[in-house]
């Protein structure tokens, strides 16, 4: 099964591996289970891309909510019947504006509101975001099930027959608009929840990278400690010799443990 991790434009990894391209949001499928700095940096890169994507979805939702709220005012039964012709034109233009939002909002050339990220899309076309040091299932987020973005147009939202003024049609239009607003609002909530989740993952990855770097710097600190111990031991021996010259009868216990540790590299 050829699963991807968003279909469409290839993404440049850039600082992680210059020249490496990842098809769509197939951000990276790690084959090496070992946690290392390169993979952790790649995971953060993926998380940031995911956060960009859900931000675009959230912005599109906000614009569509504003359009739908304006339409509610124009189809209200209390609107002036004498303005019917003008309102029909305004409604038509607003619906066209909504369709334009759905058509133009994308992430790096990948359309987001055309149904490709719907949970009902074929499983083999689902898009995944790798957010861990390897591509194991627990480190992947299924964007189709997390966002579940249906195809959004004025027609799919049931807005094609909107008309002002008539009380009967006005009430029906308001019900259709309320339903459309509910769909957009739920999508906005899902994108917000995923963004919050990704922000938490980003914090955890940053901590993991910090710990990884600290662990890698430990051998250097260890070598410095060994050198300090060796220098201290040499200084003690010199001081012992100096004192013995003054008082030959003094006997110093031999520090076998220290010599052994230095010899064994402890």
Image (cartoon, helix red, strand yellow):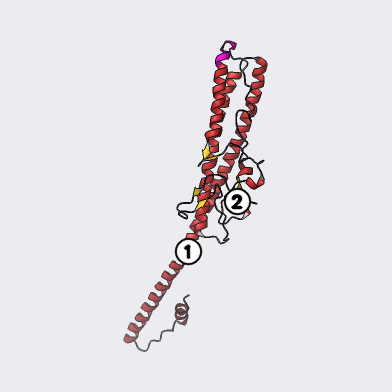
Q: Name which residue lies at 58% across and 19% down.
A: 74
Q: Is residue 24 above or below residue 31?
A: above
Q: Name which residue lies at 57% across and 10% down.
A: 82
**In the rendered structure, which segment of residues is drawn in magenta?**
79-86
Badge 2: few (under 14), some or many (20 or more) residues near its Cα, within 10 Å? some
Return the residue nearer the eye: 226 or 126: 126
Return the residue nearer the eye: 55 or 193: 55
First along the sequence among labels 1 and 2 = 2
In the rendered image, residue 252 lying in the magenta stretch gets the answer no
Return the residue nearer the eye: 59 or 152: 152
Task: Give residue 216's mark.
Answer: 1
Residue lying furthest bottom: 249
Element carrying mark 1: helix
* Secondary structure character of the magenta stretch overall: helix
- Measured as percent of width and height from the top left, residue 229 is found at 41, 74
Q: Name which residue lies at 57% across and 14% down.
A: 85
Dot in front, 1 or 2: 2
In the rendered image, residue 80 lying in the magenta stretch gets the answer yes
C-alpha gap between disc 1 and disc 2: 27 Å
Task: Give residue 140's mark.
Answer: 2
- Measured as percent of width and height from the top left, residue 203 is found at 52, 50
Q: Is residue 84 above or below residue 220?
A: above
Q: Quadrant of residue 173?
A: top right
- Measured as percent of width and height from the top left, residue 95 is found at 57, 25
Q: Is residue 244 above or below residue 223?
A: below
């Amino acid at each position: 099964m050829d699963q991807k991790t968003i279909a469409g434009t290839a993404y440049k990894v850039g600082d992680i591996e210059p020249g490496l391209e990842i098809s769509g949001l197939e951000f990276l499928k790690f084959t090496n289970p070992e946690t290392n700095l390169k993979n952790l940096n790649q995971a953060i890169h993926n998380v940031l891309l995911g956060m960009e994507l859900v931000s675009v979805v959230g912005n599109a939702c906000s614009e569509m909510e504003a359009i739908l709220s304006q339409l509610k005012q124009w189809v209200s039964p209390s609107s002036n019947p004498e303005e019917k012709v003008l309102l029909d034109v305004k409604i038509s233009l607003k619906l066209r504006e909504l369709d334009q939002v759905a058509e133009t909002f994308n992430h790096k050339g990948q359309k987001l509101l055309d149904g490709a990220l719907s949970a009902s899309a074929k499983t083999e076309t689902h898009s995944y975001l790798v957010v861990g040091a390897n591509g194991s299932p627990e480190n992947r987020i299924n964007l189709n099930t997390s966002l579940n973005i249906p195809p959004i147009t004025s027609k799919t939202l049931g807005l094609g027959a909107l008309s002002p003024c008539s009380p009967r049609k006005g009430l029906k239009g308001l019900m259709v608009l309320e339903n459309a607003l509910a769909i957009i609002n739920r999508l906005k909530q899902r994108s917000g929840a995923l963004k919050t989740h990704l922000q938490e993952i980003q914090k955890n990855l940053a901590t993991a990278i910090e710990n990884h770097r600290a662990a890698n710097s430990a051998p250097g600190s260890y070598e410095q400690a060994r050198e300090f111990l060796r220098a201290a031991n040499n200084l003690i021996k010199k001081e012992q010799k100096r004192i013995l010259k003054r008082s030959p009868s003094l006997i110093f216990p031999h520090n076998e443990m220290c010599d052994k540790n230095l010899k064994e590299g402890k």
